[in-house]
Amino acid sequence: MKLRHLLIATTVSLALLSLPSAAPAQFAGAGPRDNFRDTSILRPPAGSKVALIVFEDLGCPSCAHAHPFEVEAVKQTHVTLLRYDFPIAAHLWTFEGAVCARYIQDSISPELADEFRSAVFASQGILSNEDDLHRFLSNWLAKHGQKMPAVIDPTGKFAKEVTADRDLGLRLNVEWTPTVVVVTRDSYQVVCGTKDGANDPAQILEVVKAAMAQTK
């Protein structure tokens, strides 16, 4: 999974804001209609023809359902994955959860950060607040031979990154989690991202393959 782009995704996307907006397309099937605003951010990073963009909340059951389909699509196609944190205010621990994932990625490894996100999605039922999250993180780190830090984000760096992701989603007008979009250099197809509509994460792989075929 090309999640090494996670830390630079916001910088890349903000740099693309000056480019013309991407246009909706149908790479495969008919995705749900979107209410996006600034679609200039819906582009793959330099060097990639196709990318899978995901705005997610770690406490969202629909995000947990979509997560394995995203992972499988990237595994099979090696498409670039740009994952943005979009924590919902009503979910008391998910902003901190995203901060913890950033800590693991920056301080340990991107691969373990991926595993942590997957573990959190699978454990949503036992996480109700930040205390639950920190106990979960401490146990998870111990199982992976790591120690719980005294302070996870002493400089506020990771919180700023999560806030930047959320602000980017607001600029796009993300209304629902997960918002999953397959993008090429000039067009995109929404797979998930509306309250009502054909939000079917099982279609992610098909849409990614179709987009790749159209860019050849």
Image (cartoon, rainbow, N blue to C red):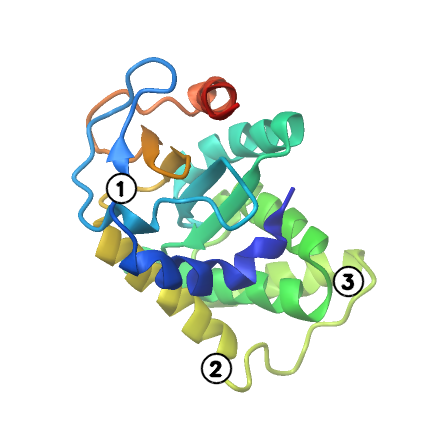
- Answer left or right for 117 relative to 129: right
| Mark 2 residue type | Gly
Q: Is residue 199 above or below residue 14?
A: above
Q: In the displayed image of the protein, which residue is found farthest to the bottom? A: 155
Instruction: Report how many numbered discs are placed on residues in the image.
Output: 3
- List the residue tagged with mark 3: 142
Q: Earlier in the sequence, mark 2 or mark 1?
A: 2
| Mark 1 residue type | Trp
Q: Label for residue 156?
A: 2
- Answer left or right for 22 relative to 81: left
- The residues bearing labels 2 and 1 have C-alpha atoms spaced at a distance of 27 Å
Query: In this orientation, does residue 157 appear?
Result: yes
- Which residue is depicted at the point 39% across and 44% down? 60
Task: Give the number of the mark in front: 3 or 2.
Answer: 2
Q: In the displayed image of the protein, which residue is found farthest to the right? A: 145
Query: In this orientation, does residue 92 appear?
Result: no
Viewport quadrant of the N terminus? top right
Picture coordinates of residue 208, whole percent (x, y): 49, 25
| Mark 3 residue type | Ala
Picture coordinates of residue 100, whole percent (x, y): 56, 65
Picture coordinates of residue 88, whole percent (x, y): 31, 55
Q: Label for residue 26?
A: none
Q: Is residue 139 above or below residue 197?
A: below
Q: Label for residue 176?
A: 1
Check disc 1 and report its element: helix, strand or loop: loop
Check disc 2 and report its element: helix, strand or loop: loop
The crowding category of the residue bearing disc 3, from other C-alpha atoms within 10 Å (few below 14, some 14 to 19, many at least 20), is few
